Structures are given as C-alpha cells and as structure tokens.
C-alpha cells in the first residue's frame, strides 16, 4: 500500500497464513461505537450448579458448499462422540450467513464466499448426517441437533425469506426421517439476530414468515445489544429495539427459543439475558425457556488479534455465567440443555473433546419443562397458545425420533446420494459492509472489494479499527480454490486516520481515503488479484 500524502505513519501488520486461520466474532453491548465494556466487574455471588456445564458441541461458520466438507464435519463430531464415555446430546449450529436470493430462489451468502440456495443446502445436510453416523461407529445412542443458521443482516430479511428457511428445515428433516437418521441427527432452524443489523419491524417479518405453519423450532443465537444489565439497569436496547421486540423474536412466537451469545467475560451478556427472562416472567406470565449458550472461544483463537477486549469467554465460563444469573431469581432459574462454541470452517477440522460431563437431555425433557410453565394461572391467551405450540413441537419431535429408532433397527439407515454441486458464484466488485465477519471490538467495516486471485479468491475490507476507531483499518483476506480462508493481513493506520473509505479502482489500485483526507493506494496486482 502506498500513500500519496506527505505525512508518514506506522502501520501495524498482523499476518496469519494457513488453512487453520479463521475469524472470531463478538457480541456488541451498550455503546458499541466505540466498544464499551461493563464496569465495575461484578463477581459471582450465586452458588454454581453442582453438575456443571454440559459437554459442548462445536458450531461452524460455513464458507463452502462442498459435499465432502459436510461429510467430514459430521465425521469429526461422530469421532469425538465415539471417543467419549456416555451418551452425548450435542447442539451444532451451521451458520450460513445472511439471506440472499440466487436466481429468484432464497439461500444464504456463506459470508460472501460461496452463496448457495436452500435447495442445494438441503442436499448437503444429509452428508453431515451420514458422516456423523459412520464415524460414531459403535456409539449408536449419542445424538446431534443441527441448527441450520442464517442471520438478520442485509436487505433480504423478509417474510418470504422466513417461510423459505422454514421450508428448508422441513425438507431436511423429511429426508432424515424417511431414511431413518432422525433419532441420531435432527434439524432445527437458527438465526443470528443482532440488534444493530436491522430494525425490529424488519426482523419480525422474517420471524413471522418462519413461524407461519412451522413444524420445527428455531434458535436465536443473537445478542441483546445495549439492553439492561444489573450494573446498568436503565439502559435501553439498541436503536429502536425494545424488550418486547427482543422477547417476541426470541420466544414470543411459537417457534422461537433463545440460544444467547454469552461472550463478555464480565458477565454483562449473561446479565442481559437473565433480565430478559425475568422481564418475560413479570410481563408475560412465564420466563423464557433458554436452550443453552453459544460462546466464541475457538473462533477467537483463530483470529490473530483475538475478538476484542473481554469478549472471549471459554465455553464453560459462558454457560456458568448465564446459569448463575438465571439462578438469582426463582422465577428464572432453569437448567440449560446445550453449550456450543463456534469457529470458522477449515478443511481439516478436529472437534475438541473436553473434561466436562455428559448431560443427556432430549425433546421429551423440554416438553416437560413447558408443561410446568403452562400450569401457571396468570398466562394470557396469546402466551399460553405460544407455549402450547412449543410443547407440541418437542412432543412431536420425541415421538418421531422413537419411530426413527425402531425403523433403523428393522430397515437400517439409507445413505444419501452424494450430490453434484455446481461451483458457487463468487461476486466480483464493491459491496457495503462485511456481512458480519467482524464486530465492533475487532473492526468496523464500511465497504469491501472482492475478486479472483491467482491462487483463488481475494477480499479487501476497509473501515475503522475496533480497538481504536480513530485509526483506519484495511483487512485483506485470501481464500484457496476450495473457499478455505488461508491468509489474513490487517493494516492499521495512525490516530486520526479512521475510518477509511473505499473510493474506487484505478489502474489496478484500490483508492482508499482516510478521515483526514489523505489518499492511500493498494496495488491489487501485487496482492495477486486477477483483474479484467
């Protein structure tokens, strides 16, 4: 990168090259621009649960539609479960990125790297199921629930998109049941609802579309950005969002269940969601049945400078924080079925084992917990109807898994046909934002360029540095032909330069403007780009 202005500055460069490099995420909190931490730190005063957190599942941000990748992911989870004592009950979220339309068909962006329709994704999930069962071997009792994930990022978050995602989940489960896998691998919907990505009315539209005639739950693995904590009880949720909105998209409709992001090491995220559940108990007559916790510790290890200060809870820490916060009030105290930690996909992936305990749960146990909530006399008709719908979904799941297990004994489990997938398109040009790659503690991306390179694909993102937004930032990401992220370089400018803006392409160079008016240029040919 060269600079035409006469003043000089120091560029901080962080380089990590190799198939194992990926990027972390963080949960924004109050005042995310710049990132704002929770102070004072509140020490735990509630006794910890005696049994401790459950074993975690490894969730994955997906950037590939290669069938072999899905088989290998399932195999990695099955190999882990085979090597562990007891029966495992794991949740794995496959996060596919924001909703998109491809040739009039809904799908997901796979974070701008491999946009894929739901029709194609439907053929890939059976490969995961087969890989899991094959590699679990003699362990015929452990199970995986797959959360098929999208987000509320972008301009395709619509009612029809929610319906399409609901149909996607339905079609996957139909195949799993017809081929006798459903007692081992079952699918639910999942969506990363982050309050800074879209206003509540837009997000509610997607939620209503999914909930219209749904058969399976969805998990909201999003944030409660800026919502109140015990330390800051007077905060308001971000932008136009209210507690009512967050409750509605996380638990209010029949299909919705929370799986909150608990990243903040100071317990701030846990406080937010525990208070949301208490608000539901006080205002709706029943607390939220929170399904578990998502953390991002593994993703933080994949990113050179981490996830930003204080946003890297280990999985057992995130789970324990939320359990403890919920236990502060008898109305919200509950068990948390799942713990899952997310990372970015890579071609060679080993699912980590851990020293935590196997805590078998299941759909029947979820239905039992909802029966107790329905016994409360002060529920209004709308809330009661929603809880009854939730309970019926779990009861139906339990019944259908019992049927699947019996059929598997008599008929066996039929292997899927390996799909032939056309190479996903890779859009070339300029685009706004980063599709959720970074959070405010890492980088605040305003615009990106992406195109082909001699070795695969290239993305260049510009904006402000997450740790000091007065500094501009350029992030260069490299992918191999299989869409595996193999390199990342981050260049940070001096104070006063940020945010950078991306102005255009001239003579093979990206033109970047700093906040103080200086011009910078990045030679794409030197970066290996193949330009028209």
Image (cartoon, helix red, strand yellow):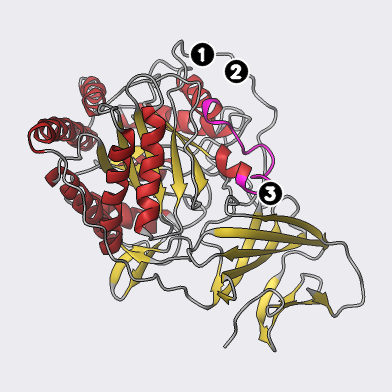
Question: Considering only vertical position in the picture, is 398 above or below 58?
Answer: above
Question: Considering only vertical position in the picture, is 406 above or below 518?
Answer: above
Q: Give percent across and percent down for residue 243.
A: 43, 40
Residue 287: quadrant of the picture? top left
Residue 12: quadrant of the picture? bottom right
- The residue shown at (37%, 42%) is 75
- The residue shown at (62%, 31%) is 265
**Cβ atoms under marks 1 and 2 closer than 8 Å:** yes
Q: Of the residues under marks 2 and 3, which one precedes in the sequence?
A: 2
Query: What secondary structure prevails in the magenta region?
Result: loop
Work out how far the residue at label 1 is from the one at label 2, CA to CA, in angstroms.
9 Å
Instruction: Give the magenta-colored segment's residue range.
Output: 302-316
Magenta highlight on residue 310: yes
Q: Mark 2: which secondary structure?
A: loop
Q: Of the residues under marks 3 and 1, which one precedes in the sequence?
A: 1
Identify the residue position indicated by label 2 in the image. 44
Query: Would you call the spot at circle 3 few (<14 residues within 10 Å), some (14-19), or many (20 or more)?
Result: some
Choose between 531 and 375: the one closer to the eye: 531
Choose between 49 and 524: the one closer to the eye: 524
Query: Would you call the spot at circle 2 few (<14 residues within 10 Å), some (14-19), or many (20 or more)?
Result: few
Tag nearer the camera, 3 or 1: 3
Which quadrant of the figure contains the N terminus?
bottom right
Q: Is residue 188 visible?
A: no
Choose between 62 and 248: the one closer to the eye: 62
Tag nearer the camera, 1 or 2: 1
Tag nearer the camera, 2 or 3: 3
Q: Give percent across and percent down for residue 528.
A: 65, 75
Identify the residue position indicated by label 1 in the image. 48
Work out how far the residue at label 3 is from the one at label 1, CA to CA, in angstroms.
33 Å
Identify the residue position indicated by label 3 in the image. 304
Q: Mark 1: which secondary structure?
A: loop
Q: Mark 3: which secondary structure?
A: loop
């Amino acid at each position: 990168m060269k600079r035409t202005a006469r003043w000089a500055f120091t560029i901080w460069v962080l380089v990590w090259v190799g198939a194992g490099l990926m990027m972390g995420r963080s949960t924004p909190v109050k005042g995310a621009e710049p990132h704002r931490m929770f102070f004072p730190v509140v020490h735990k005063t509630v006794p910890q649960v005696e049994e401790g957190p459950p074993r975690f599942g490894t969730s994955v941000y997906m950037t590939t539609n290669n069938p072999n990748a899905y088989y290998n992911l399932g195999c990695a989870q099955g190999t882990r479960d085979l090597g562990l004592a007891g029966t495992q009950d794991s949740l794995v979220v496959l996060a596919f990125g924001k909703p998109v339309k491809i040739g009039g068909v809904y799908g997901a962006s796979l974070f701008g790297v491999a946009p894929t329709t739901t029709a194609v994704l439907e053929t890939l999930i059976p490969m995961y199921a087969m890989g899991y069962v094959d590699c679990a071997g003699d362990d015929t009792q452990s199970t995986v629930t797959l959360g098929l994930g999208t987000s509320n990022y972008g301009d395709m978050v619509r009612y029809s998109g929610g319906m399409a995602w609901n149909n996607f989940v339905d079609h996957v489960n139909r195949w799993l049941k017809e081929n006798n896998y459903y007692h081992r691998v079952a699918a639910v919907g999942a969506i990363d609802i982050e309050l800074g990505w879209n206003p509540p009315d837009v997000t509610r539209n997607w939620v209503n579309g999914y909930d219209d005639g749904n058969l399976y739950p969805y998990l909201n693995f999003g944030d409660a950005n800026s919502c109140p904590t015990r330390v800051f009880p007077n905060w308001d949720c971000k932008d136009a969002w209210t507690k009512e909105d967050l409750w509605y998209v996380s638990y209010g409709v029949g299909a919705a269940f929370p799986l909150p992001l608990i990243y903040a090491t100071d317990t701030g995220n846990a406080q937010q969601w525990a208070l949301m559940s208490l608000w539901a108990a006080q205002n709706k007559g029943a607390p939220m049945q929170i399904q578990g916790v998502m953390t991002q510790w593994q993703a933080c290890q994949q990113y050179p400078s981490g996830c930003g200060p204080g946003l890297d809870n280990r999985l057992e820490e995130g789970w324990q924080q939320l359990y403890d916060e919920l236990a502060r009030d008898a109305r919200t105290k509950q068990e948390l079925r799942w713990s899952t930690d997310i990372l970015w996909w890579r071609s060679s992936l080993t699912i980590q084992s851990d020293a935590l305990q196997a805590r078998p749960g299941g759909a029947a146990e979820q239905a039992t917990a909802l029966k107790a909530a329905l016994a409360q006399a002060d529920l209004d008709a709308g809330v009661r109807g929603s809880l009854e719908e939730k309970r019926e979904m779990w009861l139906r799941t339990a019944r259908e898994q019992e049927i699947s297990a019996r059929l598997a004994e008599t008929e066996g489990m039929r292997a899927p046909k390996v799909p032939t997938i056309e190479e996903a398109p890779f859009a070339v040009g300029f685009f706004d934002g980063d599709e959720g790659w970074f959070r405010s503690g890492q980088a605040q991306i305003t615009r990106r360029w992406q195109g082909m390179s001699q070795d695969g694909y290239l993305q260049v993102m510009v904006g402000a540095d997450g740790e000091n937004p007065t500094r501009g930032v350029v992030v260069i990401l490299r992918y191999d032909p299989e869409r595996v992220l193999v390199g990342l370089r981050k260049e940070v400018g001096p104070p006063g330069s940020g945010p950078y803006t991306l102005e255009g392409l001239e003579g093979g160079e990206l033109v970047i403007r700093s906040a103080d008016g200086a011009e910078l240029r990045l030679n794409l040919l030197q970066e290996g780009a193949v330009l028209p």
